[in-house]
Amino acid sequence: MSQVDKVFSKDGALAKAIDGFQPRVPQVKLALAFEKAIQDKSLLIAEAGTGTGKTFAYLIPALLSDKKVIISTGTKNLQEQLFHRDLPLVKRALKSRSKTALLKGRANYLCLLRHSQHKAHPMLEDKKLLKDLKNIDKWLLSTESGDIGEVTTITEDSKAIPLVTSTIDNCLGKECESYNDCYLVRARKKAAEADLVVINHHLYFADMAVKDTGFGEIVPDSDVVVFDEAHQIPDIACEYFGDRISTRILVELGKDMELAYRTELKDAQQLGKAAKNLMTNARQFRLSFPELPEKGNWRDKGQTEQCQRELDALVKSIDFAYEVLKEQIGRSKSADNCFERIFEAKQKIAKLTTWQQPDVSLWYETTPRHASLNLTPLSIADKFSNLRQEKKQAWLMTSATLSVDDRFDHFTDLLGLEEYTSIQLDSPFNYKKQSLLCIPRYFPEPNDRAALNALVDLSLKIIDAAQGSCFLLFTSYRMMNLVADRLKSKIDNPLFIQGEVPKRELLKQYLAANKPVLLATGAFWEGVDVRGDALKCVVIDKLPFAAPDDPLMQARIENCRRKGEDPFSKIQIPQAVITLKQGAGRLIRDVTDHGVLIICDPRLVSRPYGETFIQSLPDMQRSRSLDKACEFLKQR
């Protein structure tokens, strides 16, 4: 019997440490398969259904291996759950003395230098911003980690956060006067010394794509890598193997140039002029796009007359700032840092305006205040397969949703993976008994104006039947906010709406409330574990197809057509199936859970492809009757 077998046995370490622990056959299978992958330094791809217990299945072989291990999760939420809840439990059971560390990207840590500078910031007339900064000041007195996510008194999108955190661009690295006290440096030092480090995919691929010269490698080298929620990797990796520049970055650079002029280089009047030019033209460039936020094809938009005019002015202001900063090299650390950033901006804008590049998508995205220009490769199969070959490591890629029609081709083709072992493990839950899938009869099509009212009416009925304890999951912020506005005046249940406070705090408040209702989009479709009566119903507004006007999706579709393939069946359906499986997976999290999944999209039954979606979902009871769904909830 191997070490892993012993830990999972009826009288093993887990049974002794956890009351009522029962070994699960799929969990042990995954643990043993991963143990072998570690020994062979091979790649294991594992789809483990909800309830398999995959976290313990990979943590135990990882900790027993006595090797340096990186565990990369899909989101910061999952990172924290894994590090603060699951890992301590397993370490206690194993009596492990392994050193562990949690490492996030730099934007999550307070920058002491930028925090000290914020009092000179011209935006301080903003009362909300001032209040948020004061809340950060209070939190700073007690924090040990400097993780800005600990500040629960400010919103996720607070304007204060970019003022007190650093970016690769504006970080002074070892030249910074606060380097020895830097929270980011401390976190990375701890990670370098740890046996097991918990990171997230964004950080892993940021490290692969660019080595951070301020601190050397971000992610320490390791012998073993676990990618949990691995279905996210193709999209995240594409993002990091591309290029991006935004007006936010340019405005921040202009502010830092202005600060250098006002504090260290008061004689360099041209620097002040260049800073104002850059900020003005960056903001003016945003005005060449529609007022409402959108995504679009930059290759087309960038060559229009209006865009060309604003683009020329922006490029001239970047060139002017470059020449002015070049004259100041060696006079100020902050000005030297600004020069490096403007040099990089010059290179990126040149790349992002080379219109005839093959095999890439050029696209833009706007927020109410800013615009970003993006270059994304259409395929990273070559780069990713090379990365896999270069790293002589054991890899586990696991998720509850990797297969489509019981095949992994969709996933492995995207990443160029050829040599691997795969395993599929079903959920141990009795979905037939525990749950019901309802696709309401006569529900309007998603693009029908009547869909909003129908969704509100359905929500009111189901919230009443379930007595709260509902997740309403949406494919867009717009629909989420429209439904939230209507429900506020119609129900007394406490409503929790994504974005109002950080995700971890929102979930905490939801769990503490009586008869709560959560309205959320993307981030809550996965990685959220709510058990028992706290969640009895999940409502999904429509099938989660990527927006048809999404420029990256458009480029992939065109590329697929050029190869003579059908993009709808090759790209769009598999992606939407995986997303839907994730959303549906929020409902049943334990053997004692009961609940109803409602998908408000008649295409599931009216279109031929609907069957592919239904077959991918757990084998629940099914009904077209909302009354039957309500009855199911009331009986329990």
Image: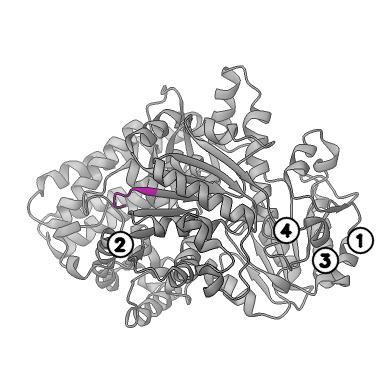
Distance in Å between CA atoms under marks 1 and 3 = 11 Å
Q: Earlier in the sequence, mark 4 or mark 2?
A: 2
Q: Residue at x 38, y 49 (%)?
A: 224
Quarter in which the C terminus is drawn: bottom right
From the viewer's perspective, is the residue at label 1 or at label 2 nearer?
2
Q: Earlier in the sequence, mark 3 or mark 2?
A: 2
Distance in Å between CA atoms under marks 4 and 2 = 36 Å
Which residue range is magenta in the image? Answer: 218-224
> Would residue 558 appear left or right of 224 to someone viewing this image?
right
Q: Residues within 10 Å of mark 3 (few under 14, many from 20)?
A: many
Is residue 342 positioned above or below 307 on the image?
A: below
Is residue 325 positioned above or below 527 on the image?
A: above
Do the CB atoms of the residues marked 1 and 2 lie less than 8 Å apart? no
Q: Amino acid at mark 4?
A: Phe
Give the residue number, with chain letter if any, for mark 3. 462
Element marked by disc 2: loop
Q: Amino acid at mark 2?
A: Ala
Distance in Å between CA atoms under marks 4 and 1 = 22 Å
Magenta stretch: includes residue 94: no
Element marked by disc 3: helix
Distance in Å between CA atoms under marks 1 and 2 = 53 Å
Give the residue number, with chain letter if any, for mark 2. 194
Look at the image and tell me whether residue 522 can be seen: no
Give the residue number, with chain letter if any, for mark 4. 429
Residue 343: image location, x then y, percent: 22, 41
From the viewer's perspective, is the residue at label 3 or at label 2 nearer?
2
> Would residue 510 appear left or right of 161 to someone viewing this image?
right
Q: Earlier in the sequence, mark 4 or mark 1?
A: 4
